[in-house]
Amino acid sequence: MKTALLCLIMMISTATQAATDTPKVMHFNQPPKTPQALYVIELMGMVYQSLDIELRLEEFNHKGSLIAANAGNLDGQLARVASVEKEYPNLRRVDYPLFQFNLQLFTLCGDCKLRELQSLTVRSGYPVATTYLAEHQIQAYVIGVKSAVAQLNLVMQKQVEGALILDFHLKPHLKNINEETLQIKNLAVVESFHFVHKRNEQLIPLIKAKLEEFERKGVIKMLKAKYQI
């Protein structure tokens, strides 16, 4: 009888502790307004709402947001590539890809190859490009800039030979480019994931389960169609 009572007390205590550990609010940085970002904001807002957690967005430097999230000043990252967990070990990945995109090479040099280029530009705050260059041991001189427009201007003005750019960053600007020698090559298909700070890693199985539920119910398909992803 005493053993049964002790087990019951322990179960109640565990349940109470789990409820106490669940945050009421999760803070993330406001990402740049792209269709992908709007899709992730709506999707993850629905996920957290279903878990009785409020998702709040704060204005934050995109590059600095990774440092802030790793330090615990933010509760995670709405969507980042898997490789960030190597440099930011306090971030925990929810193993469910939210969407895919292409890392592309943008050049004006006809049929040139990445390894042949001496200078490149990447967008600061998006480590997917620098990770790709490191993994493929590309030795080009690299300039980091704050926007896709700055990347394209450097290429168009022939200050660098190429840009490593995300497809959804490039797409809105293509209509303004008329160069006959324009070349765009897909370098890699990359998946984007949701991350939480390690203090909230108990939420990971709950978040993943909700994402899988939303997939079964067609919610994710509907949202991707809404934002044309």
Image (cartoon, rainbow, N blue to C red):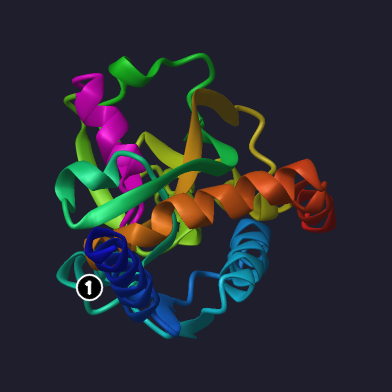
All told, the count of numbered labels is 1
Residue 194 visible to an observer of this rendering: no
Between 31 and 130, the residue placed more toward the observer is 31
In percent of width and height, residue 180 lies at 66, 30
State the image coordinates of residue 126 (x, y, percent, origin top left): 36, 52
Residue 34, given in percent of the width and then of the height, sits at: 62, 63
Q: In the shown orientation, is residue 179 left or right of residue 165? A: right
Give yes or no for residue 223 being in the magenta stretch: no
Considering only vertical position in the picture, is 85 above or below 114? below
Q: In the figure, is residue 50 to the left or right of 65? A: right
Q: Residue at x 51, y 56 (%)?
A: 207
Quadrant of the frame with the N terminus: bottom left
- Does 134 lie within the magenta span? yes
| Region rendered in magenta | 120-138
**Residue picked out by circle 1:** 68
Amino acid type at circle 1 is Ala
Point 62% across, 50% down: residue: 211
| Closer to the camera in the image, 225 or 105 | 225
Q: Name which residue lies at 82% across and 47% down.
A: 218
Q: Secondary structure at mark 1?
A: helix
- Between 131 and 77, the residue placed more toward the observer is 77
In percent of the image, x 84 and y 52: which residue is there? 222
